[in-house]
Amino acid sequence: MADVSALLPTSASISVQICYARPDKQFLLEQMVLPGTTIKQAIQSSGIVQQALEIDVSVWRVGIYGKLKTLDTVLREHDRVEIYRPLIADPKDSRRKRAENKDTKKKS
């Protein structure tokens, strides 16, 4: 396993982004990594976990451009790694409640 923490940009490096959003702040970090670097390695070496201490990739989902991926997925040039916060509400339940409230207002 390559040590990606001390990488300097070289002609063999690839460019990736690590992104994470919370209600009060968004993080978008550009990073140069070696070919063969995994999502987990890139997240660890990016320093994003030190900037947003709530991140727990051992439990949280990650993806590349909106598609869920595993932590051992190997990155390619220009990939954008996305770290997804856990949902606090089920989107289907939320939608259903909004529809019920809308129907109730129409009947009033």
Image: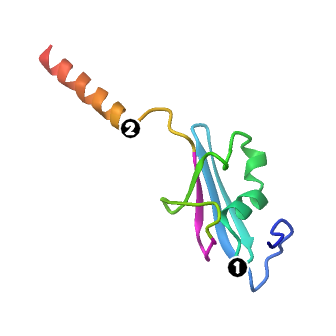
Q: Which residue is mark 2?
A: 91
> Where is the C terminus found, in terms of image quarters?
top left
Q: Is residue 39 above or below residue 107?
A: below
Colour convention of the picture: rainbow
- Say which amino acid is labelled 1: Pro
Q: Nearer the viewer, residue 98 or 90?
A: 90
Q: Which residues are magenta?
A: 74-84
The image quarter containing residue 13 is bottom right
Residue 77, position as x, y percentages in the image: 62, 77
Using a 10 Å C-alpha cutoff, classify the residue at mark 2 as few (fewer than 14 neighbours), some (14 to 19) or many (20 or more).
few
Relative to 9, is 40 on the left or the right? left
Residue 10, position as x, y percentages in the image: 79, 82
Q: Judge whether residue 23 is colored magenta.
A: no
Q: CA distance from mark 1 to mark 2?
A: 37 Å
Q: Judge whether residue 78 is colored magenta.
A: yes
Q: Is residue 57 above or below residue 8?
A: above
Q: Residue furthest bottom?
A: 11
Residue 3, position as x, y percentages in the image: 84, 70
Relative to 89, is 53 on the left or the right? right
- Say which amino acid is labelled 2: Pro
Q: Residue at x 67, y 73 (%)?
A: 15
Relative to 22, is 56 on the left or the right? right
Relative to 26, is 100 on the left or the right? left
Q: Residue at x 68, y 45 (%)?
A: 56
Q: Which residue is mark 1?
A: 35
Q: Nearer the viewer, residue 41 or 58?
A: 58
